[in-house]
């Protein structure tokens, strides 16, 4: 029995000399303390997360397009539908083709509208986005085939520009900044509607079926 105890004591002495097990003869006190440094090191690891979160917070800064929308949209006191009304009144018997809010040459907000007569003759009308006053229409010179194509497209579009815009804003509340009659990749007539959300100044484009009023595509432009 005595030899076994001495053997154990010798092992402890060697372990202590090698600094591998402090207090080998102690049943648990020293060992628990030795394990604490790794726990302390792991506890410090999460401190990297807040800095990562802070750096990702930088992505919340607005892009150039978002800043442009934030500056332009609130300046427009005339809505898209009133601009279209002014444009169609400027060209008797015409129907809306498109309208888009832009910054005018003088820095003022303008609605650039396109309307077409029943034969497909297209005219561009600029409408002051503050006063609602329409400029003199500029008629586009097109050949007979282009005019017929536009006339046929307008005839096939049983959904109006305003109905398409209402469908888009029913899906996402915001300010309509553009509406355009177009065809998608499937050669189907659509109204492309841009809606700007003023909480983040993103633009969402909706493709609305010009016959069934169904949303066929939705795309958020965060640039």
Image (spheres, grey):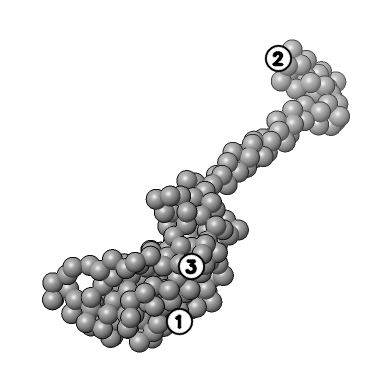
Residue 90 picture location, percent across and down: 36, 74
The circle on residue 212 is none
Q: In the image, what residue occupies the spot 51% across and 69% down?
A: 79
Q: Quadrant of residue 93?
A: bottom left
| Marks 2,3: beta carbons within 8 A | no
| Marks 1,3: beta carbons within 8 A | no
Q: For numbered disc 3, what is the local secondary structure?
A: loop
Q: Which residue is mark 3?
A: 132
Mark 2 and mark 3 lie on one chain; the one further toward the N terminus is 2
Q: In the image, what residue occupies the spot 81% across and 18% down?
A: 9
Q: CA distance from mark 1 to mark 2?
A: 84 Å
Q: Is residue 158 left or right of residue 21?
A: left
Q: Is residue 10 above or below residue 38?
A: above
Q: Which residue is mark 1?
A: 163
Comparing labels 1 and 2, the label whose residue is closer to the camera:
1
Q: Is residue 71 above or below residue 95?
A: above
Q: Which residue is mark 2?
A: 18
Residue 19 picture location, percent across and down: 73, 16
Label 1, residues with CA under 10 Å away: few <14, some 14-19, many ≥20: some
Can the viewer see residue 113 in this picture?
yes
Q: Is residue 14 left or right of residue 197?
A: right
Mark 1 and mark 2 lie on one chain; the one further toward the N terminus is 2
Residue 95 picture location, percent across and down: 34, 80
Q: For numbered disc 2, what is the local secondary structure?
A: loop
Residue 173 picture location, percent across and down: 56, 70
Q: Is residue 40 left or right of residue 2?
A: left
């Amino acid at each position: 029995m005595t030899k076994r105890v001495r053997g154990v004591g010798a092992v402890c002495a060697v372990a202590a000399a090698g600094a591998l097990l402090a207090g080998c003869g102690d049943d648990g006190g020293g060992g628990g303390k030795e394990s604490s440094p790794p726990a302390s090191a792991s506890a410090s690891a999460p401190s990297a997360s807040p800095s990562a979160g802070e750096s990702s917070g930088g992505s919340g800064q607005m892009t150039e397009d978002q800043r442009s929308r934030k500056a332009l949209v609130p300046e427009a006191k005339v809505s898209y539908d009133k601009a279209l009304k002014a444009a169609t009144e400027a060209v008797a018997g015409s129907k809306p083709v498109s309208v888009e809010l832009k910054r005018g040459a003088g820095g003022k907000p303008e609605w650039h509208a396109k309307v077409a007569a029943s034969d497909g003759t297209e005219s561009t009308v600029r409408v002051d986005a503050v006063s609602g006053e329409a400029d003199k229409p500029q008629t586009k010179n097109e050949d007979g085939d282009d005019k017929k194509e536009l006339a046929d497209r307008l005839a096939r579009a049983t959904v109006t520009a305003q109905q398409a815009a209402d469908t888009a804003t029913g899906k996402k509340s915001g300010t309509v900044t553009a509406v355009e009659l177009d065809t998608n990749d499937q050669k189907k007539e659509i109204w492309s509607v841009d809606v700007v959300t003023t909480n983040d100044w993103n633009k969402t484009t909706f493709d609305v079926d010009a016959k069934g009023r169904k949303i066929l595509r939705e795309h958020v432009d965060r640039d």
